[in-house]
Amino acid sequence: MIAALNTDLYKGLPPLKEPPADFEQVANFLQTAVHTRHNKSSVTPTKRPNHSSGSGYKAILDCLRSPAKSDVNLLYKVLRALQGGQVLATVFGHPQLHATLIHFALKLHLFDLGPKSGADYKNKRAGEEGVEGGNTEQDGSKNEIYDDVMNAHYHLLIAICSANSTFLHPVLDVLMRHIRFICARDSLDLNECNIILDGSGRSSGDPALDKVHATIQKILMLVPKAKIDLFPLVSRNFPHITNPSQLVKNYTVVAMQMWQYGDFIREDLVLLMLNKALEMDVEIRIEDNGDVILDDSKKDTEGDKEENDVHVVEKQAKKLKTVSDVAHKLDVNMKLIFSFLDKQERSFYGLYMPQFIPTLLDVYKSKFVQFSFWYLMEKDACMEHDENPLYRQFISELIQILYSTVSSPDSNHISNSTIMSTASYLASFCARARFVDTDSICEVLSGLLTWAIFYIQQKNFTRNKLFYSITQAIFYIMCYRGRQVMQYRTDQVTGSQHDVSAERFHQLFASDALNPLANCLSSVRLEFQVLGGEFGLIPDSIVTATKKVKKKPAANKIMTPGISCLRNQLGGIHSQAKVSNPLDSFFPFDPYLLRQSSDCIRQYLYWEDVEDLTYEREGENDDESATDLEASTVMSSQEHHGSIVLKDLDEDEDENENSVGGGGITISSEQDECSVGSTEEMSIGENLRIDEVNSMESWRKASIGSQGSW
């Protein structure tokens, strides 16, 4: 069913003006030349056309071949004359005979004839209104004829598609190339304010873009087949990651503006935007020791060892700049995606986002794109409505993937990597999302416990790595939300449908053939041992068999590769130490490290606030609450801390290691303050970082349960 025509969408392409007085002479000349050409070649239509057969026909070709050298008024009349019914039918009804003429008519490049940017267009408007600094009357006249020629060309493209749908694909390809050319202009700077989704007829940010959008819309209405051909061309012309940042950003905004074209293209556009961001995301790799490199940078490591120190420094600086470039493009792209999602209704998630989940799960160590899901769920959690929050739908979809293997854990229905990735997403999301209610966390823990216990009961230990990934996910969630979960269980009546009792945790250690604590991140193991000893989650036999972990007033430090990356930026203690990661696992919702877009992630649980979240029911305020390395990157509100403080609470830490250079961070003693240098020093290539002020302050203002303004 074709939607009703919204005439506002076509204001960018006004109707053609009345033809000039001498237009009939040009039209008759063109018609005569075309028919003469056609009649001379009609006997042998398969023969290659001879352009010298008529001087009139050749003159038309010369006019279209080099528009910059042609008379603009004559070019306008020729384009108008080509739209005549008889001429149009003759030329485009015999494409083999008039191949050269058709080629020049389609590929006509008119952008060098007049204004090249929205800024030039504003100057033109200023001149028309008599504003000081505007163009002269002569310049205004040139701009007017330029607009007329552009309008005539786009109307010709519409007429071509109507006359012969064979040319639909070439015409759409020409229009997408025009968009690509416009987006490459240095003076064009589109941003989130130019994202138009409602078909309101507002300007796209550039008059030339308005014309192209209007032309495509008209073709879509006249030729329904265009709905099939359009998106592949949009995707094919999307700039590569190596293209300039301005081009990538402008084209992304234009692709978002195509949302108003209709439902037929919307799902493809969403997946395109996310996939392009994902391509940039996976280019940036965070090593286990926290180093940030591009995906192909590792192969140069061996060669660096044989070169002199000066050359190595120069080469590393070049790599850092390359990382910075990719990070900047991704940062800008994520900012646009968040702005795009902010304009969507609640139903957007169910219609478009689940299709991207399989792609995310199959991509190894994505770091940023998954926060598009986070943004929608956080936005929804801050709104008042009677429906289940979106995060429960997200959690349910992930649990269903795990449960599809419960009946037969050794089946090959779902790949091992997908199951491990699913467990990582569940663990990281439940641990970090402040807006997720405790009942949902208990549901996730119960589901993970069910999978692990069933695997043990099967006694077919062929997929132990999966089992360890599931148990690590359980331990990780408990490290962040364990005390909150235990308090919730205490407050609930007996018979809760989500069984997260200590007895179920004991069953994780029921098999002598499996050792879940020995096969996870060492920092997660240490913290869970503290928690397990406090709440009896670990059997006594396991506790006595492992190293005794002394209960501390503050928690251990949870270390993942993403957090190590953050510590490296800030010059934290042991910043170059490799994280013990036996499962080669990752936590996709580790701190968001992009500069500009980080302020869109608000209700994020940092390690330093775990204690505050745990005892928030009782109103307790422990001034000696633990601070992870994340605490060194975020500035707490004045009522919590007067300055950024990094405490070293590990009693076994080397006390002589008092000062650490890098990133402008200085650690002098347990109670000393850390002086923070410039944001450039704290960033990875200037862009890969957490904005410590905006990120922390924004989610503090939008605390759990608050109805934020979106």
Image: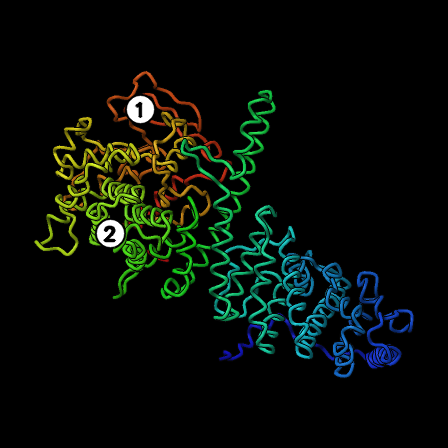
- Residue in front for this viewpoint, 316 or 683: 316
- Could one spot residue 60 in this view of the protein? yes
| Quarter residue 309 falls in | top right
Determine contact: label 1, label 2, CB under 8 Å. no
Q: Where 555 falls versus 457 (above or below)? A: above
The amino acid pointed to by label 2 is Val
Closer to us: mark 1 or mark 2? 2
Q: Where 115 falls versus 533 (above or below)? A: below
Q: Percent from the top left, x then y, of residue 158?
A: 66, 74
Q: Where 697 falls versus 546 (above or below)? A: below
Q: CA distance from mark 1 to mark 2?
A: 40 Å
Q: Percent from the top left, x then y, of residue 341?
A: 42, 59
Marking on residue 672:
1
| Quarter residue 637 falls in | top left
| Quarter residue 633 falls in | top left
- Could one spot residue 605 in this view of the protein? no
Q: Give the residue displayed 81% in from the left and 64% down from the top.
A: 65
Residue occupied by mark 2: 444
Q: Give the residue displayed 50% in from the left and 62% down from the top.
A: 269
Q: Give the residue displayed 60% in from the left and 62% down from the top.
A: 233
Q: Percent from the top left, x then y, of residue 386?
A: 25, 66
Q: Give the residue displayed 23% in from the left and 47% down from the top.
A: 455
- Residue in front for this viewpoint, 459 or 433: 459
- As helix, strand or loop, the secondary structure at mark 2 comes to helix
Colouring convention used in this rendered image of the protein: rainbow
Q: Percent from the top left, x then y, of residue 56?
A: 89, 73
Question: Sequence order check: which comes first, mark 1 or mark 2?
Answer: 2
- As helix, strand or loop, the secondary structure at mark 1 comes to loop
